[in-house]
């Protein structure tokens, strides 16, 4: 059994596992009880499992735990809370940007990565930034409106 | 003795009021609905309906859903019926409960019921507090009484919740990353399981390389085998996952019969064994001098392609089976599980837990059955089955491929006077029960295939025949239906059922007929339809898009129009599509006008409409399940690369309007868009290419082939 030390949402975590190839997604959900990051395909295709690793958006379903030593992970749980929502979460609620909502956690993470690099993205830039996330319900336009709204909130100084 | 009252919607089958409404604690109301949340916002809509008819604030109302132990049996959450039949039932149940409380309060207070009113649960007499409320009176009211439909429903003008935009109850958990889905459920002592799927009905297990599979797992796993049903179980999900993936090549089968490439196209259906029927008068043998028009349309198999693979949990303890599922009908699943597991229905509780959108009958019921079959083998241990991505794509039931031939006879003005829609299709009704098996059941010992199931009856909108009957004023119409009895893959319901292919076919033909008659497509439609609400959406959609009569398509740009009333009895929908052809179709803008009658949640209805439009663009421009003789599992569409769907950068601008018809009965909107959007894309493509493609999907390959043929 090996021990892996890294951080999740600003807190140090340490997990001990037999299989060094255990996907980060399974560690988040089954070892750390963080259920917000979802399993969609296990093939790095759909984006349901998107997290930030050292501020870069990464699909976590095939990311082996052995590569995580010392890394800083941000999941959707690290964005905000109902009491203190991240501007993206506030905007998604205001726009009611969801149907089934299964893709939303990954999309919020991709959108956060975009807005940190580009505070004033065009609709086209938002779309391209979200092309790694699949939404099957057809909520795309609401989601993109919500990201635009969040960008405006953040430019106006809102923080989580 | 008086005949029992006819009750609205699903209240007729579930007349006991306490099945719908309870007052569990002071200040609290719980309503039970058999409808389940599929991402369409139905729980929030039911909350709005109950709040209005019980005269309480939204915050007091909790909605409990899809639970065979508690909720009314409303069959399936499908067919855009939740609002049309479920919400009207909820409205009347709440109105009857409201009336019972007023009567009881009048008795206690010693006044007439009409002096009383209810405000947020408190009983008022001529506007003044009486000290009584729902909760002080609840003990004196017998909610085992049956509905009478005598409670006055609130007038539309007095609604405070219905018709307002209300935040969805389920979205915060999904946006803040809380436990929200069945996949997130954890039960004490739960084991994970993956099924090694029987490739097809009748295939038998040959060899299992247990040692190699165990090595691949890199953790402890075990096998559960019942006949040809094989599963891998363990406490570590990663090990079970790895073993499940490894097993695909390390378990061999006999009697494997994968579908072949030739079976993937619609035209394969012609000349296959079928059950045939004629709906309407016989087709005239002699056109009596009238001009004849004929065209043939096809569509391939389509996947539901739910974003999460199906998941089911089950616990068999003390002779009692409890199953957690994201299926669309907990009661029908319970009945099917009773047959599969050889248990009494009373020994099974089925509870709905949310999952990703399903858009019809995906793997949900089958994953639940898998969990239950395994749970029977290990009493006392909760079992969680989560399908693999490729399992969902390959083994979920597909939406049938179809061929639709339209034959019309035209009068001297070029208007259709006789219309035949001849349809070849497998059965759109593959749901458990009604003659269909749960997938895992097919692998169990002693399995006997049931006789072929019946297609969805016409009274419920039909399956393959759905919207095969044009709403236009055509003196003679008929449907010739060939139900293909031996399809190459499992089939079942996908959003809209046969309406997508039927409306694509008939709305393409209407455009062709307009061109033959030298008329603008919108003007032509208006000249052959008298239904006022249909005319209103057609006129409104055209106006929204600033439709210009006879505006020609320019090179690589086209604009198309289409209309349908879903099932000819649900919502009306007309749309304009603008598209450009690069190498493939890029839909740029969609305008639509919808008449859905009374809308409980305008924002929710628009969300559903927009989702339907975008999903239809994806179906029409990209989606077809492909087969391969050499692949053991048959379909080669097994992931998001081999079965791509519309991406963010491919989604058009969408402009929507709901017509103000709040005095009309509510009409479901979840499935109205598919057919008209398909038709409008086909018509716009014709304007852009100058040639018509009659086979779905409208792929780059088909566009290139059509352009090449044009050049010759």
Image: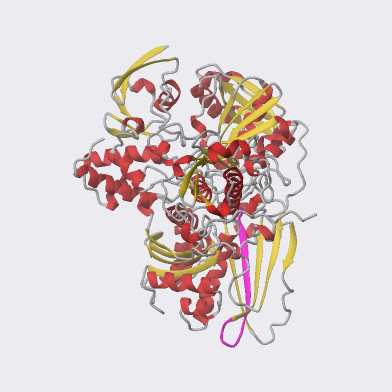
Going by the image, does B163 lie left or right of B282? Answer: left
For the N terminus of chain B, the image quarter is: bottom right
Q: Is residue B189 visible?
A: yes
Q: Which residues are magenta?
A: B399-415
Using the image, determine if residue B554 lies above or below residue B335.
below
Q: Position of residue B147 (x, y in %)?
A: 66, 49
Q: Is residue B412 magenta?
A: yes
| Residue B633 rendering spot, x and y as whole percentages | 60, 39
Q: Quadrant of residue A98?
A: top left
Q: Residue at 56% across / 67% down in the picture?
A: B505
Query: B637 or B440: which is nearer to us?
Result: B440
Is B267 a magenta residue? Answer: no
* Residue B641 in view, yes or no: no
Decide if residue B492 is on the left or right side of residue B238.
right
Where's residue B239, x and y in %?
51, 21
Residue drawn at (72%, 38%), measured in percent from left and top?
B202
- Residue at 41% over, 22% down: A32
Foreground residue, B705 or B120? B120
- The vertical placement of B202 against B478, above or below, is above
Query: Please, which residue is most extreme toward the right here?
Result: B1
């Amino acid at each position: 059994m090996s021990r892996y030390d890294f951080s999740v949402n600003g807190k140090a975590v340490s997990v001990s596992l037999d299989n060094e190839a255990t996907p980060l997604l399974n560690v988040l959900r089954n070892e750390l009880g963080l259920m917000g990051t979802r399993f969609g395909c296990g093939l790095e295709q759909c984006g349901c499992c998107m997290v930030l690793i050292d501020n870069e958006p990464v699909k976590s379903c095939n990311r082996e735990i052995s590569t995580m030593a010392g890394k800083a992970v941000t999941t959707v749980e690290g964005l905000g809370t109902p009491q203190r929502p991240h501007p993206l979460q506030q905007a998604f609620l205001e726009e009611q940007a969801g149907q089934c909502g299964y893709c939303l956690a990954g999309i919020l993470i991709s959108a956060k990565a975009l807005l940190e690099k580009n505070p004033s993205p065009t609709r086209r830039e938002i779309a391209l930034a979200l092309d790694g996330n699949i939404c099957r319900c057809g909520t795309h336009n609401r989601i993109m409106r919500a990201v635009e709204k969040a960008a405006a909130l953040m430019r106006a100084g809102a923080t989580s | 003795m008086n005949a029992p009252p006819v009750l609205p919607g699903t209240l007729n089958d579930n007349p006991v009021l306490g099945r719908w409404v309870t007052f569990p604690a002071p200040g609290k109301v719980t309503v039970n609905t058999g409808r389940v949340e599929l991402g369409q916002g139905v729980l929030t809509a039911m909350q709005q309906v109950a709040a209005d008819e019980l005269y309480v604030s939204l915050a007091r109302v909790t909605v409990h859903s899809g639970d065979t132990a508690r909720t009314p049996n409303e069959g399936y959450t499908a067919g855009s019926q939740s609002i049309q039949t479920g919400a009207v039932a909820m409205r009347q149940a709440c109105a009857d409960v409201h009336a019972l409380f007023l009567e009881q309060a009048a008795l206690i207070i010693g006044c007439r019921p009409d002096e009383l009113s209810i405000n947020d649960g408190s009983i008022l007499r001529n506007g003044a507090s009486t000290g009584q409320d729902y909760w002080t009176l609840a003990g004196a009211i017998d909610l085992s009484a049956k509905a009478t439909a005598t409670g006055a429903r609130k007038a539309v003008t007095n609604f405070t919740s219905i018709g307002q935009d209300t935040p969805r109850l389920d979205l915060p958990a999904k946006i803040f990353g809380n436990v929200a889905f069945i996949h997130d459920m954890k039960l004490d002592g739960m084991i994970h399981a993956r099924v090694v799927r029987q490739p097809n009905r009748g295939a038998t297990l040959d060899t299992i390389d247990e040692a190699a599979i165990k090595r691949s797992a890199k953790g402890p796993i075990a096998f559960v085998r019942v006949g040809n049903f094989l599963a891998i179980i363990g406490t570590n999900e990663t090990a079970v996952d790895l073993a499940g993936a490894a097993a695909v090549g390390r378990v061999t089968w006999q009697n494997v019969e994968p579908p072949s490439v030739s079976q993937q196209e619609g035209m394969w259906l012609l000349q296959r064994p079928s059950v045939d029927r004629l709906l309407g008068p016989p087709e005239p043998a002699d056109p009596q001098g009238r001009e004849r028009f004929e065209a043939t349309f096809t569509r391939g198999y389509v996947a539901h392609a739910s974003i999460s693979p199906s998941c089911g949990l089950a616990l068999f303890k003390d002779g009692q089976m409890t199953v957690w599922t994201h299926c669309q009908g907990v009661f029908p699943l319970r009945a099917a599980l009773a047959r599969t597991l050889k248990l009494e229905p009373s020994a099974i509780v089925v509870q709905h837990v949310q999952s990703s959108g399903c858009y019809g009958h995906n793997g949900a019921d089958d994953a639940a059955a898998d969990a239950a079959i395994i749970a029977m083998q290990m009493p006392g241990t909760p079992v969680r089955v989560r399908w693999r991505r490729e399992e969902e794509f390959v083994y979920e039931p597909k939406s049938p491929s179809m061929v639709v031939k339209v034959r019309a006879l035209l009068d001297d003005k070029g208007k259709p006077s006789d219309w035949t829609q001849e349809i070849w299709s497998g059965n759109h009704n593959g749901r458990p029960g009604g003659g269909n098996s749960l997938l895992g059941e097919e692998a169990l010992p002693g399995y006997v295939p049931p006789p072929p199931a019946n297609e969805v009856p016409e009274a419920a909108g039909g399956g393959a025949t759905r919207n095969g009957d044009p709403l236009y004023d055509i003196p003679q119409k008929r449907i010739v239906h060939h139900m293909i009895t031996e399809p190459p893959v499992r089939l079942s319901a996908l959003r809209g059922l046969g309406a997508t292919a039927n409306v694509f076919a008939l709305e393409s033909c209407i455009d062709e007929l307009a061109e033959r008659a030298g008329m603008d497509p919108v003007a032509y439609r208006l000249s052959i339809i008298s239904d006022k609400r249909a005319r209103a959406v057609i006129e409104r959609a055209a106006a929204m898009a600033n439709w210009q009569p006879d505006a020609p398509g320019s090179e690589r740009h086209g604009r198309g129009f289409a209309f349908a009333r879903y099932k000819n009895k649900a919502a009306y929908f007309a749309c304009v599509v603008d598209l450009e052809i690069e190498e493939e179709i890029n839909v740029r803008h969609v305008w639509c006008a919808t008449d859905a009658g009374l809308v409980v949640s305008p924002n929710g209805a628009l969300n559903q409409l927009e989702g339907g439009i975008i999903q239809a663009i994806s179906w029409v421009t990209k989606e077809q399940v492909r087969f391969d003789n050499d692949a053991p599992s048959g379909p080669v569409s097994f992931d998001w690369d081999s079965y791509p769907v519309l991406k963010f950068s491919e989604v058009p601008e969408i402009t929507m309007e709901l017509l103000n018809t709040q005095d009309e009965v509510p009409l479901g909107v979840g499935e109205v868009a598919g057919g008209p959007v398909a038709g409008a894309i086909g018509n716009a493509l014709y304007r852009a290419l100058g040639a018509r493609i009659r086979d779905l999907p409208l792929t780059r390959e088909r566009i290139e082939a059509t352009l090449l043929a044009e050049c010759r």
